[in-house]
Image: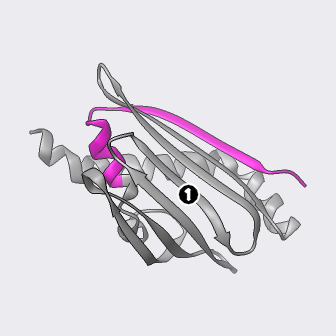
Amino acid sequence: MSRTVIEAERVLPYAPADLCRLVGDVRVYPEFVPFLKTLRVMKEEPRPEGGWAGIAEADVGWQAIKVTFSTSVRCEPAKGEVDVALVKGPLHALENRWRFAPHEKGASVRYWIAYEFKNPVLQAAISANKDKLASRIMAAFEREAIRRLSKQTR
């Protein structure tokens, strides 16, 4: 079995560092990220410009499927980077990268995730729907950016 890769890219009318901080604000993910039931930050170390590094544990579920996993998270708004990597859980691998760069219309946002579940049935089910999943995740973050950041740009 191989890793499934999901990628998405958008241009949004906000500052790259603001979008990076939004994506790095993992505590509020259960409020707007599809399938994410709970998220707990287990360890946190502050970084410059509103960034941080630490460990987060997430409960993800849809229909009869529920999985819990822990990840390391690094958010560095000054660099326009959020990186997530598997610590433990029902996966062989999980890597997630968000990149934010200046763009004439605001910020270029790139989302990339590669994962491989230990359970081949779960891997196949999620991989079969990867395009829909990528679209839903990016749309959720776009809506949250509009909700949180549009007030700042007025």
Q: Residue furthest left?
A: 154
Amino acid type, mark 1: Val
| Disc 1 target residue | 84
Toward the viewer: 50 or 102? 50
**Quarter of the figure with residue 75:** bottom left
**Quarter of the figure with residue 27:** bottom left
Left or right: residue 51 compared with residue 57: left
Question: As displayed, is residue 2 above or below residue 119?
Answer: above
Which residue is located at x 13 percent, y 45 percent?
152
Which quadrant, please, contains the N terminus? bottom right
State the image coordinates of residue 72 (x, y, percent, origin top left).
55, 65
Is 121 in the magenta? no
State the image coordinates of residue 30 (x, y, percent, origin top left).
43, 71
Question: As displayed, is residue 57 above or below residue 133?
Answer: below
Q: Residue furthest top?
A: 104
Which quadrant, please, contains the C terminus? top left
Question: As displayed, is residue 106 above or below residue 143?
Answer: above
Left or right: residue 87 compared with residue 30: right
Toward the viewer: 144 or 118? 118
Q: How many marks?
A: 1
Residue 31 seen from this side: no
Which element carries disc 1, helix, strand or loop? strand
Question: As displayed, is residue 148 above or below residue 10?
Answer: below
Which residue is located at x 13 percent, y 48 percent?
151
State the image coordinates of residue 127 (x, y, percent, origin top left).
76, 53
State the image coordinates of residue 102 (x, y, percent, origin top left).
33, 27
**Chain part drawn in magenta:** 1-22
Q: Residues within 10 Å of mark 1 (few under 14, many from 20)?
A: many
Which residue is located at x 55 percent, y 68 percent?
35
Q: Residue furthest right?
A: 1
